[in-house]
Image: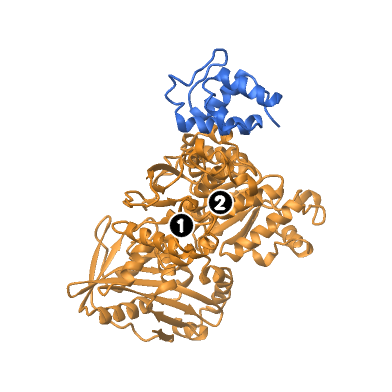
Amino acid sequence: MNEPPALPASAAERSLRRAEWQPVVFAERLRRVELARLRPSDLEASGPLEALSIKVFRNHAFEYVASALGPFLAFAGFSPTVTLSDYDDALSDVTVGARVALVWLDFSRYAGRFERPEALAAWLASRVTAMRQGFDGPVLVADHAPLGGDGDAGLAGLNAALETALAGLAGVHLLPVSALAEALGPGAADPRSKALGSRWSDRLNLESARHLGLRWLPASVAPRLKALALDLDHTLYAGVLGEDGVQGVALTEGHRRLQETLVALRARGLFLAVVSRNERADVDALFAARDDFALKAEHISAWGVSWGAKSEAIAAIAAQLRIGVDAVLFVDDNPGELAAVSAALPTVKTLHAAPEGALTARALGLAPGLFAWRVSREDQLRAADLAASEARRALETPELDREAYLASLGVKLTFAVPQGEALARVHELSNKTNQFNLGMARLSAAEVSHRAGSAEAGFVTVSLEDRLSDSGVIAVVGARREGETLVVDEVCISCRAMGRDLEDLIVGESVAHLATRLGAAGVRYRWRRGPRNGPALHWLARYEAVEALDGDDGGEVPSTPRRPRPMPVEIIWSM
Amino acid sequence: MAKELDRAAVAEVLEAVLGVAVSRTEDTRRQGLAAWDSVKHIEVVFALEDTFEVEISEAVVATLDSVDAIVRALGGLRAA
């Protein structure tokens, strides 16, 4: 509906440029000159990169990181504007005025100034809390990178203390720069700190820029991808199945590592799909016969094996997985296939598979959109839940009416008022749900935390279980009281729960509870039109018997708190 | 492998880091080139070390104020 107009030829060009950039941005050893030769404007073929403003609070040089950040962020689809604070150990001015705050400290400068690492961590947490006044965006805090020498004296245990001190602060993430330094060993430090303004070597600067640009910053401001669509020949193994045969294709050491990486990504909640020009029977025989493959047929949630266009296969796979094509990363060794898919589906992300599987594995470890700060229970349940939905469809016979169908599933809904760690799932649903998202509020972690702690507002989360699967928390309803009225401005239901006619029950039960708890008599549903939230708007119009929702952008529909009609569903309140 | 050291090779490094055209035939001096500020100077040093596989001491960093000076200094470091 409000999708930006597609520019197919330009999208294909961008896909090819990205493939050309890959050897530089995913290089085992980064080179400053090679990075400097990459021009972010080259990736603007299909439209401008998304602006991303970053305020850096620092007490040592960040300039050498900032100058390398552009190509990595451009690869991830962003154009950064970096504003640097003064060199200030005290973090006295914590005004952000940007989309993301980044705290970049050389902790060795605090050595001896605090009695214990815990005191230093507590002080930093207090400065981050002060930063929250008027700023509810993400705050990223680089941890302590020990570089050896006297500078690190007394700082043992600081990173554990930072983790503890920052854990309770919503939307604050600790960046493991220490792991980057550890991987570089003695190469992480530069003894010329006086001339450089930093103890960090350029290798550590460049690795930090890479992780900020490809992983940490994109994960702070953009939703995670949901599926990998994988080519087979020359991508997951060496050789061509149709020519070399089931036993003739080679699982090299690099391809074995790649397959293990894919299995690990699946365990972190990503769907794996196969998109291949092959005979399906050959592909089935391959996965059945090759015991040495780490990737098994049961790891694949959707198959697109045909001689047709790969773009059509990817569109079909996205529909089967109930996700948008913009949440798919397509991996193929043939740049022509990448370009053709981009031309047909400009929002699909692409990754060029290298002949050596190990390079593709490293690229997948760094590729934008795959990193997540945390792996939720729902992430781990996702693939099994999808498989259960196939079995659920098989149960849905024309002879069975809807109520009998629900009764046969043994559906159980558990309602809860989320607090603490459960708020992370509220933030996730608010930012990842596209189809059944009524308010399109896209709440930040800090906003979620603030509203959950308010006497005037609140959330209800809903978990779904039936005899086929446990889907975890699949919905959130959020509202606040304005006078005597409950304004429901956040209703998100995961597509995993749709198709079972549970929406009335989920929303009605939640709203009735919120109205009672917050002391509201009336209800207004606030809605906004988004690119793909037709199902939510259609539901509201039906639920409130409104002919059509007026307004191009959004509006409100008055209602009353009411319990839904009884259904053969077990309802549990977990208080 | 370290790149062959000559004025053109040094100019290529400067051009990439500074984002401005640098002559292959005539000397280019830091003074008078706005893009070659103190921060970019350190990035130039990092890039030279990486490209030509040398280590430049703190004392030498300050002397690298032209393409010719860089060629001379790097030549000395490689010979050492």
Q: Dot 1 surroundings within 10 Å: few (below 14), some, or many (20 or more)?
A: some
Front residue (pair A460, A91): A91
| Chain identifier of the residue bearing label 1 in the image | A
- Chain A: its colour in the image is orange
Same chain for labels 2 and 1? Say yes or no. yes
Is the residue A56 above or below the residue A324 in the image? above
Quadrant of the rendered structure where residue A518 is? bottom left
Element assignment for label 1:
loop
| Residue under the point 57% across and 16% down | B24
Q: Dot 2 surroundings within 10 Å: few (below 14), some, or many (20 or more)?
A: few
| Chain identifier of the residue bearing label 2 in the image | A
- Horizontal placement of A124 versus A206: left or right? left
- Chain B: its colour in the image is blue
Where does the image place residue A346, in percent across and percent down from the top left? 49, 46
- Say what amino acid the circle numbered 2 marks: Asp
Q: Earlier in the sequence, mark 2 or mark 1?
A: 2
Is the residue A525 above or below the residue A218 in the image? below
Is the residue B43 above or below the residue A239 in the image? above
| Residue under the point 65% across and 44% down | A28
Let me know if residue A401 appears in the view.
no
Where does the image place residue A237, in percent across and percent down from the top left? 73, 52
Q: Which residue is mark 2?
A: A150
Q: Which residue is mark 1?
A: A223
- Horizontal placement of A198 versus A355: left or right? left
- Say what amino acid the circle numbered 1 marks: Pro
- What is the residue that sits farthest to the right in this orientation? A247
Front residue (pair A462, A466): A462
Front residue (pair A27, A262): A27
